[in-house]
Every structure is written in structure tokens, then in C-alpha cells.
Image (cartoon, grey):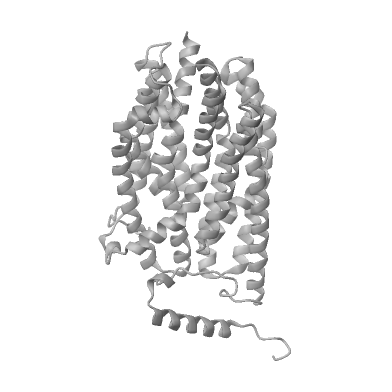
Amino acid sequence: MKKFIGDVGVAAQGIVQPLELILTMYISVGLSGGLVSFVSPALGKGDYYTVQKYFMHYMIYLFLIMIIVPVFTLPFMGKIVISLGAEEGTDMFKYAKQYGYVIFSIGTLVYSINYGFGNILRATSRSLFNAIKQIFTACIEFLMVYIFYTFVVQKGHVQTYTNAAAPVIANFITGCAVISLFIPFKRLNRTYKLKFSHKGWKPFDFLAMVEMLIIAIPDLLTQFQGPVVKIVGNKIIAKITKSYAQKKYQVAVLQMVANLSALVNTSNQSFSFAFGPSFGYALGMKNWNRVREIMRKTFYYQTGLNLILWIIMNGTVYYYSNALIHGYWPMVDDCTFGFRCFNAVMPLLTCFLCVNDINQMEQKPIKATLIQFSRMVLVIVMQPIISYSINNVKGIYYGVLVGDLAAYIIGMINFVERYMIYGKLERGEITTQQARIAEVTGDMKRWWRKSRKEQEKSNVQTRDMAVAEEPVPADIV
């Protein structure tokens, strides 16, 4: 009975967690990634007006998230849980609702603060602080889980209110530390570049918010892929499985596979978070040698570490799953298979992840969106096609494998192409205009902001600059 209740608890959280990650965490992380695409190049140029302006406009998005998510989820929690794959009247339905009520209320507030502001720290040379913050968050969460299940919850029972309360408390504590950096104290944080200031809203620029949202779309797609894969997987499981017991079992397996992949995903995400701001800063300075160096080192280090993790995890995942599931061999085998499919192409995804930041820092949101969208579409299209064709839930994992393989090819082609372009810029063979690299300027006057006369004048100035930057042939010199 204790094992059955435990499985229901895991499955109930697995039903809600994809939507939880999207609404409470990944939206704020994705939007802050869009903000970083403006902040990093602007800091490289020393343009603090642009930095402060976009930061304060980003604050409006966070405020809207904290209001909209609870309003549109809490009154409809039962319907939401059913739409995510739970059956009405079951234990899974009951526990999933308990978990959702806590997460989508106070959880939305603390997650938005902790991750929405924490992600910005990487653009302002506070990556170490952010890393320490993440470690403390995990430690506090583990401590809360231990306290709840030792002193609050009766043995042999599952209480998903406490399961949700643990991460909420942990993120609240570390979120307070993060947000303190942005408060304009006179004696503390005097060298920090981003502060809460109403001057960033004067004048209010609606187009700045639109630009931030557009350039954040690739980051949002990147963040949403994991939860979307799980949502689609839960739907496929609901259609293919023939009993409630089978459905509960397969949902728990999918949740376990996602949890086992956390270390691998953290490795990729950590390098991506470090690459983007460093690359954008060098791009803003037009230091092409530094740009190419960052690309090379990121490729070598990230691919090398991912390969080491891939070898270690593939060798130990079977024994780790066995220890986690306490010798339930069918689930151990399924978790091992799912993990190996989920992460089969993992060491090769370095270029794909870097290309996302490269296009964003070059102010090419459409290209970055198309590249990220291609991976997500391939995965969510191939999952049902393969699953229904073989009438087996293993098609969920095969679909991820096919999508990641296509992403590797797309990312490699784009990465090599941009690396060669920066080489031409370093040698003076082409100009930034010819390389199609847009700049983050102080007044942020883009083509859709300008009148026709201003646009014609800007085009003339651009042509003059291109002529001035045109490299002089050696024979003329």
C-alpha cells in the first residue's frame, strides 16, 4: 500500500509539473533571456541608458505574470488537471489538484522573482552569485522535504501540499537575496549596473516591450520544450494504455526519465547561460577575436563535459534507477531505455544551443525562433507518429531522439557559418553591415519606429559607413 501511494504521488506531480514549469518558471526565464540579448551588447558598448530602460520595462512583464497566472489557473484547477491527463475522481486527480493550488498561487510569485531576476545576474558579471543561489535553493528544498516528511506527514501517506511547499519556501528565501541586489542602497551594491528606478519608464516605450517579447521567443521555446514533451507524452500514454494502472505506471516512468536527465540538462543550460552574456558583451565591443575565442572554448569545454557526463550516466543509469525505484525491475528497464533515448544526442547539441544566443545577440529573433521551433516541431510531431505507428509508448522517447538529431545538424551548419563570418570581420574582409549584424543603440530607433524620411536618411548613413569601413586592397596601399 505504501508503494502504491508513493507511485500515485509521483504520477500526480508528474501530471502538473510540465505546466508548472512553463507558467511559474520558464516564462520569466525566457523573458529575462530576451532582456539579456539587449543588456549584454549594450553593456559592451557602455550604453547604460539602454540597459536601464529595458530592465525597467521587463519589470512590467514580471508583474503581469504574477497576476495573470493565478487568476487563470486557480479557479479552473480541476479542469486543468483533467486536460493534463488525470482522470476525475481518482487519487491522481486529488493529489494533482492539491499540488497545483500551492504552486500556481504563492509559487508563481516566488518563482518569478527567483528565476526572473536570477537569470539577469549572468549578464552583469554575477554568474557566481547566481550559481551559489541555485545550490542554496536546492539545499533548502531538500531540508524542507526532510522536515515535512519527518515531522508533519504521517508515514505511508502522501501529502502533495507539503511537496509543493518545500520548493516554494526554498525559492522565497533565496529570491529575497536576489532581489536585494537590485534595490538602490546608497552604501551597498554601488557598483551594480541595474537598479530599480522609475526613470527607466520615462518615457514609457511600448515598442520596447514588444521588441523584448519578440526576441525572447527563442528562449521561451527552449524552456518550453521539456514540459511540452511531457505534456504530449502524457496525452499519448492516456490514449495507448488500456487501464488506469498502466497509465499511472507509464506517467511515473516518464517523470522519472525527466528527473534522471536533470544533471545533463543542467550542464547544457549552465554553459548556455555563460556563453550568451560573454558573447554579447564581446559583440557589443566589436572584438571579433574575442567573439571567435568564446565560440571555440565553449564548443570544446561544453562538448567535452557533455561527453564525459554522457558516458558516466549511460553506464550508471541502470543502477541509479534500481536504487531509486527499489528493485522494481520493469520500471528500471523502462527508465533506463527512456533516459538513453532522451540523451542520445546530448554531447552533440553544443552548436545548436550556442546558435540560439548568437542570433539573439545579433538581433535576429526570427532566425533564432525558426531554428528553435524546428526542433520542437520535429519532436512533438514525431512522438505521436512513431507511438501510434508501433502502438507503443516507447515512441515518445524515439521522437525525442529524432528531433534532437535534426537539431544537431541544423545547429552545426549555422555555428560554422557564423564562425567563418566573424573570421572575415576579424581580418577586415567585410563590414558589420555586410555580415548583417544589427547593433543595440542608445535611442533604440529601429526601422519600424522611423518615418519614411528618417529611414531614407538612415539608409544613406548606413551606405556611407559601409564605404568608410570597406577594406582597402593591398595593391592600392
Indicate left or right for 38 with 435 as reference. Answer: left
Q: Is residue 164 above or below residue 113?
A: above
Image location (x, y in percent) of residue 27: 41, 45
- Kindly identify the residue that appears in the image at 47 percent across and 61 percent down: 40
Quadrant for residue 258, please give it: top right
- Any part of residue 118 in sight: yes
Image location (x, y in percent) of residue 360: 51, 59
- Any part of residue 339 in sight: no
- Kindly identify the residue that appears in the image at 33 percent across and 45 percent down: 65
- Kindly identify the residue that appears in the image at 28 percent across and 64 percent down: 204
Q: Is residue 323 above or below residue 188?
A: above
Quadrant for residue 139, please give it: top left
User: Depth check: 161 or 410 in front?
Assistant: 410
Query: In the displayed image of the protein, which residue is found farthest to the front?
Result: 389
Query: In the displayed image of the protein, which residue is found farthest to the right?
Result: 475
Indicate left or right for 379 with 1 as reference. Answer: right
- Kindly identify the residue that appears in the image at 37 percent across and 46 percent down: 178
Query: In the displayed image of the protein, which residue is found farthest to the bottom?
Result: 476
> In this figure, what is the number of numbered marks?
0
Image quadrant where one finds the C terminus: bottom right
Image location (x, y in percent) of residue 112: 36, 43
Image location (x, y in percent) of residue 450: 38, 75
